[in-house]
Image (cartoon, rainbow, N blue to C red):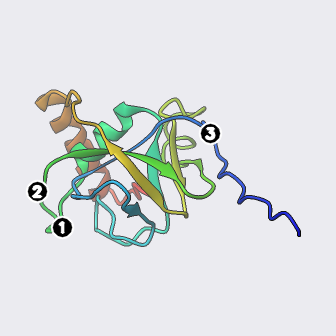
Amino acid sequence: MTDTPADPEPTGPDAGATFYHGTRADLSVGDLLAAGRASNYADRTPLSWIYFSAELESAIWGCELAVGPERAETGRERIYIVEPTGDWFDDPNLTDKKFPGNPTRSYRSRAPLRIVGEVASWTPHPPEILAAMKDNLAKLRTEGAQIID
């Protein structure tokens, strides 16, 4: 009888950390978040990556800036606790372009993320800070900047 080795553990930066994904989607524990779905941001183009972070702050921004299914800010803001099912990598949208060294601990993967919980309570950004961020993102879009790679 031959021993079958276990599937290798997914690897990436911050292996073993608690990971978060901010959205307005209404999902359940056990559901998978996968690449190929419409972006929560901008023009709703399907993305070839799924994004997440080991910092709650990044997930707060994610859910506050996400749009609902009708391109409006509808749906309750949610932060899910997720676990990668495959390998993951630094998110170049932040790491290389804005924050060298990845202090936001933001990542992306082509493999799905499994929802293992939901953050029940978190502190939103003050309205004026959120409005300033949205204004800045709108300005970047009108300038033709590609916000998500």
For label 1, the SS is loop
Q: Is residue 62 left or right of residue 74?
A: right
CA gap between label 1 and label 2 equals: 8 Å
Marks 1,2: beta carbons within 8 A: yes
Q: Residue at x 11, y 31 (%)?
A: 127
What is the crowding at mark 2: few (fewer than 14 residues within 10 Å), some, or many (at least 20)? few
For label 2, the SS is loop
Quick one: which residue is furthest to the right in this view?
A: 1
Residue underneath mark 1: 69
Q: Residue at x 79, y 60 (%)?
A: 5
Residue 44's place in the image compared with 118, above or below, is below
Q: Quadrant of residue 142?
A: bottom left
Q: Which numbered marker is on residue 109?
A: none
Q: How many marks?
A: 3
From the top left corner, tell me how far across and down residue 7 is, in percent.
Answer: 71, 60
Mark found first going from the N terminus, 3 or 1: 3
CA gap between label 2 and label 3 equals: 33 Å
CA gap between label 3 and label 1 equals: 32 Å
Indicate the quadrant containing the N terminus: top left, top right, bottom left or bottom right: bottom right
Question: Mark 3: which amino acid?
Answer: Ala
Mark found first going from the N terminus, 2 or 3: 3
Residue underneath mark 2: 74
Residue 107's place in the image compared with 141, above or below, is above
Residue underneath mark 3: 15
In-front residue for pair 121/54 = 121
Circle nearer the viewer, 2 or 3: 3
- Is residue 149 at least partly visible in the picture? no
In-front residue for pair 113/22 = 113
Question: Mark 2: which amino acid?
Answer: Thr
